Image: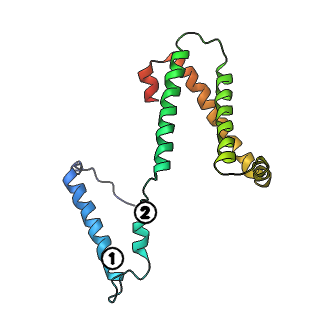
Amino acid sequence: MAEIRPATSTPRSRTTAENMEEGSARKASIRTNLSAESDASDGKPKDGSMDKLSKAAPAVSSAGLKVLILLAFQNCSKNLLVRYVMKDQPKFLTSAAVVGSETTKFTLSVLWILLYERQSVHSIIEFLKNDFKTTLLVIVPASAYNLQLSLEYVAMANLDAAMVGLL
């Protein structure tokens, strides 16, 4: 049976310099391993591990950056608009607002497929038919997301804007 001994000292937290030193040591270890695996004649790794490192962090394309900016703008404006509308007692059902929001997203997604992807409506229907099981499995997280949005409307009606921002 193992004996339990009381701790004689508390472990100290690591400093930033120690963390940086460990990170530098780890990078040096990776470089050493890569150079040891490289062929003496051409200096390239035998197993393609350098390719793995160079592909580890791809750059964000300009289209991807535009989409991220658009999503950030959409999310901020949605929260501001909902907060403004929910300030007083709203004259609509919050579930209707959620369904309207999701219908707008669906419409924009279909337009994207039709205009930018150059696909037909028939191809969308065929995709949903062929991948019916996955489509059914997506219903579970979609329902949870719908509940989350409905609760977000309730939170914006009852909490301060700063508190909702923390959520």
Q: Is residue 4 left or right of residue 75?
A: left
Query: What crowding class fits label 1: few (fewer than 14 Cα within 10 Å), some (14-19), or many (20 or more)?
Result: few
Q: Find the residue positioned furthest to the top.
A: 88
Which residue is painted at 66% across and 46% down in the image?
115
Which is in the foreground here, disc 1 or disc 2?
2
- For disc 1, the marked residue is 33
N-term mark: 1 or 2: 1
Which residue is painted at 31% across and 79% down in the image?
35
Which residue is painted at 38% across and 80% down in the image?
45
Q: Position of residue 52 (x, y in %)?
A: 43, 69
User: Looking at the image, which is closer to me, 26 or 68?
Assistant: 68
- For disc 2, the marked residue is 56
Q: Position of residue 109 (x, y in %)?
A: 65, 42
Kind of element beneath mark 1 = helix
Q: Is residue 56 left or right of residue 33?
A: right
User: Looking at the image, which is closer to me, 135 or 75?
Assistant: 75
Circle 1: residue type:
Asn
